[in-house]
Image (tube, rainbow, N blue to C red):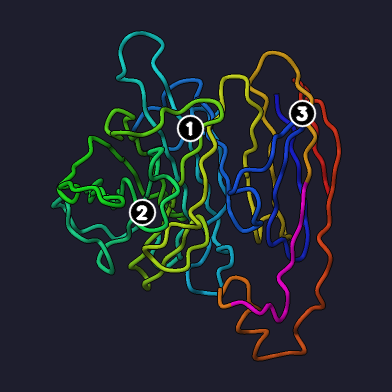
Amino acid sequence: MTTRITMCAATVLWLASELAGAATPLPHEQPFRNLAVSVPPLAAAPTLDGTVDPAEWVSAGMMPRLIEYDREDRLMDDTAKFYIGYTRSTGSGQAADALWLAWQIQRPKDAVAPKATITQPDRSFYRTDDAIEFMLNCRPLSKDRKIGRDFYMVWNALGTKYDRREAFDKEVTDYLRWNGDWQTVSRTVPGFGWEGEARFPLGMLEGAEPPGAGVRWRFQLCENRSTPEPFTALAGFQLTWADARLYPTLLFTGNEGVFVRVLDSGAMAAAGKGGVVLELVNPAAAAQTVVPTLKFYQRKPDAPSSQTYLRSSRRNARNPSARRPPRRPATLRSTRRVSSSSTAWRK
């Protein structure tokens, strides 16, 4: 049961959606720049083989393209898809309890295959191998911490891992020696780039709030390239590398919770347009009525802020005539009944 929403515009800087009946906005919903990603329960655990089969990930949440870190903080032009979901055991065992992540990342034509040379665990990949970094702040006492990560995991295309934990406040631990029982498998897709899957057992995330309807974690996802040139892209804005205040949010849903998938965003070369494509999913057997509110924001040409992502781009700063006058946020509001029939919205 899905409803697809397509919005096309010359520039779409951000979008926030609110469902009918929502209570007072959570902290992450108030500033427009803070990303929130829906994390639903998966219908079944995917096969961890490095091939992202759409049929296996059809019930997963999807997040937007990454943001170029320290390069005007804009969405990447290359196509990328990121899937996320969780599984919980129905019996007494906990082997099936896990958080799942999958990625499909388009890479430059002269470096389609990600560089992967490091085979020893817990070695730095920085500026040596192409790598993906996944950071989780998921414990109730530290998920909104200002600095650091509860769990920090990095891997390359060979599946070589680097991981650690970072103490919060006055904790005295040997977290740097932590090795989690997580797995990742990936492959090179000829003519496209890098895709793969990762499984993070919930049992290894000591002290984490168990996933379920209404639970929220903080996270950061990073593509850290070394080839063809050093480059870093993030799921959400970040002022400095250790700063966790603006980490995006994972919003867990239940078996009947309506959620949003970001099918695409930014410059869509195949369609010849830019914008965002969303899919509203109702996993329940019965139809549900929701009221999406879509808000668009445009960066101010001369925003008086020390934060680079709130200032005008360097290109516009050098060329004042290229600046566009500020616009009011546009709000679209409509009531839709999400049923078995699929309806497309175009704006």
Q: Quadrant of residue 124?
A: bottom left
The region drawn magenta spans 294-305
Residue 202: x and y in percent read 34, 29
Q: Residue at x 70, y 47 (%)?
A: 277
The magenta stretch spans residue 232: no
Callout 3: helix, strand or loop?
Answer: loop
Q: Residue at x 76, y 42 (%)?
A: 5
Picture disc at residue 85: 1
The amino acid pointed to by label 2 is Ile
Give the number of the mark in front: 1 or 3. Answer: 1
**Real-space CA distance between mark 1 and mark 2, rounded to the nearest whole angstrom:** 18 Å
The amino acid pointed to by label 3 is Ser
User: Residue placed farthest to the top in the image?
Assistant: 91
Relative placement, left or right, of 258 versus 341 is left
Q: Quadrant of residue 283?
A: top right
The magenta stretch spans residue 296: yes
Asked whether the residues under the numbered discs 2 and 3 touch, taking CB atoms below 8 Å apart as contact, a structural biologist would say no
State whether residue 66 is above or below residue 89.
below
Label 3: how many residues lie within 10 Å, few (<14), some (14-19) or many (20+)? few
Magenta-colored segment: predominant secondary structure = loop
- Which residue corresponds to mark 2? 132
